[in-house]
Image (cartoon, rainbow, N blue to C red):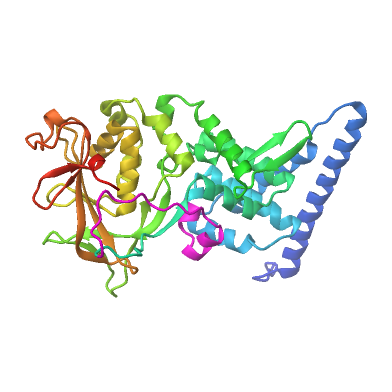
């Protein structure tokens, strides 16, 4: 008996199978709606339609997206972005739920192009100014990269992709619970259920009042965690993330932009500034903690990201290299937890001095990201003056951030008019 011939592509069969699946979904949804409506006459008000949609998303996520890696998920995100049918919206919800379950929401944003990120309308937050700048030498516009992840931007992204209908609100609440399981509490605070109206509300991050409530609800969830739990969260909770460029220190000690064999600048994922959510989360986790305790418990990558990003570069003299966004972030962290900055420095490969000295070398770049030669500042963050490597300097009288002048004298930045 000859084997039955099967065409390599059975288009009619495929269309029939898809049609059958859509019919079953429509039928089950209608039944759920009917039961929900009918039960109201008995005094019950159980949300059968929501339960059906959540279950269907789980099934779709496992069937269609469970096997996919990050790049495949990004491709699916793009193909579904403009599919505004009922099926498309359900698939988008299933996709985002699966991405959240994998802990990949930040990774998804990180793989997007700067143009895609710009379309999400991220909030603008200028970096903190340096303690000292050489007038006329630093470029007016530096290419410091593009921030692609923080709590507000994530909320904008989810709202734009999922919409603001009741099922989107319900899913965002589920994602908040998923975030707790996968150690991404920054997934919290993007929707709420109003018991007075019986409706879901998706917070509009562009509306100051709604953004405030979104922020408060997210921080309330974070404050439920113990100190040790806070330590173990992903770095996304404590700082913004950005697309930037990779830099190195040459054999001559110069900071240089890293390029490939064709001379194209190599990109890198780097830490950005700190929004209100990230600032308060950092403060809750690390304020009033000792250096040893902070050194012991957080994820190793949290220390790297606090100092620089996915890659930490330290020159031969023991200075961490970074741009003015890095300086502003570390300066802000220092104001909340000096011990935290020292702990992160040590875990990132920095010198373990008794004085808790953290040395930082700030470089500047032009609009193409290339380093401007001969224009940089050097700082030392001193935790314990009496044990610092700079303890013999008469200017070192208390803990603080000191700029290292060209004559090697130190000046506390508190004494500089910024």
Q: Nearer the viewer, residue 414 or 360?
A: 414
Q: Residue at 35% across / 45% down in the picture?
A: 329
- Location of residue 263 in the rendering, given as x and y in whole percent from the top left corner: 28, 73
Residue at horizontal 21%, vertical 32%?
A: 399
- Where residue 336 sits: x, y (%)? 35, 33
x 78%, y 60%: residue: 19
Would residue 308 be seen by someone viewing this image from the given angle? no
Residue, far left: 392
Check residue 187 for magenta coloring.
no
In this view, the residue in front, 339 or 208, is 208
Is 119 contained in the magenta span?
Answer: yes
Report the span colored magenta.
Answer: 107-136
> What is the magenta segment's predominant secondary structure?
loop
Relative height, residue 263 to residue 78 (above, below): below
332 versus 11 height, above or below? above
What is the quadrant of residue 394 in the picture? top left
Q: Nearer the viewer, residue 282 or 210?
A: 210
Tell me: 229 left or right of 364.
right
Q: Quadrant of the N terminus?
A: bottom right
Identify which residue is drawn at 55% across, 30% down.
220
Q: Position of residue 93 (x, y in %)?
A: 65, 49
> Horizontal and vertical percent for residue 404?
15, 47
């Amino acid at each position: 008996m000859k084997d039955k011939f099967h065409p390599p592509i059975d288009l009619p069969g495929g269309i029939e199978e898809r049609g059958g699946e859509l019919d079953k979904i429509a039928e089950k949804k209608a039944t759920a709606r009917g039961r929900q409506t009918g039960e109201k006459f008995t005094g019950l008000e159980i949300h059968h339609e929501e339960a059906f949609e959540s279950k269907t998303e789980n099934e779709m996520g496992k069937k269609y997206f469970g096997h996919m890696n990050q790049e495949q998920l990004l491709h699916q995100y793009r193909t579904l972005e403009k599919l505004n049918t009922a099926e498309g919206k359900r698939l988008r919800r299933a996709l985002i739920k699966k991405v959240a379950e994998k802990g990949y929401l930040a990774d998804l944003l990180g793989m997007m192009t700067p143009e895609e990120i710009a379309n999400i309308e991220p909030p603008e937050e200028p970096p903190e100014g340096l303690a000292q700048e050489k007038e006329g030498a630093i470029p007016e516009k530096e290419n410091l990269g593009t921030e692609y992840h923080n709590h507000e931007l994530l909320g904008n992204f989810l709202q734009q992709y999922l919409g603001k209908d009741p099922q989107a609100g319900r899913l965002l609440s589920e994602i908040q619970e998923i975030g707790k399981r996968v150690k991404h509490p920054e997934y919290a605070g993007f929707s709420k259920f109003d018991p007075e109206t019986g409706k879901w509300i998706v917070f509009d991050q562009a509306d100051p009042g709604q953004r405030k409530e979104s922020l408060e609800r997210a921080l309330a969830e974070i404050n439920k965690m113990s100190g040790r739990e806070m330590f173990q969260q992903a770095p996304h909770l404590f700082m913004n993330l950005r697309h930037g460029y990779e830099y190195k220190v040459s054999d001559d000690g110069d900071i240089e932009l890293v390029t490939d064999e064709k001379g194209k600048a190599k990109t890198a994922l780097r830490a950005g500034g700190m929004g209100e959510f990230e600032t308060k989360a950092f403060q809750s986790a690390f304020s009033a903690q000792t250096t040893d305790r902070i050194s012991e418990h957080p994820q190793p990558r949290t220390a790297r990201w606090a100092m620089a990003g996915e890659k930490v570069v330290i020159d031969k003299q023991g200075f961490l290299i970074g741009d003015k966004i890095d300086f502003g972030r570390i300066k802000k962290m220092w104001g909340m937890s000096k011990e935290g900055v020292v702990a992160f420095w040590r875990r990132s490969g920095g010198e373990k001095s008794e004085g808790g000295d953290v040395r930082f070398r700030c470089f500047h770049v032009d609009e193409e990201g290339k380093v401007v030669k001969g224009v940089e500042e050097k700082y030392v963050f001193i935790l314990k003056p009496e044990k610092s490597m700079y303890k013999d300097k008469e200017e070192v009288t208390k803990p603080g951030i000191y700029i290292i002048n060209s004559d090697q004298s130190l000046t506390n930045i508190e004494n500089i008019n910024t």
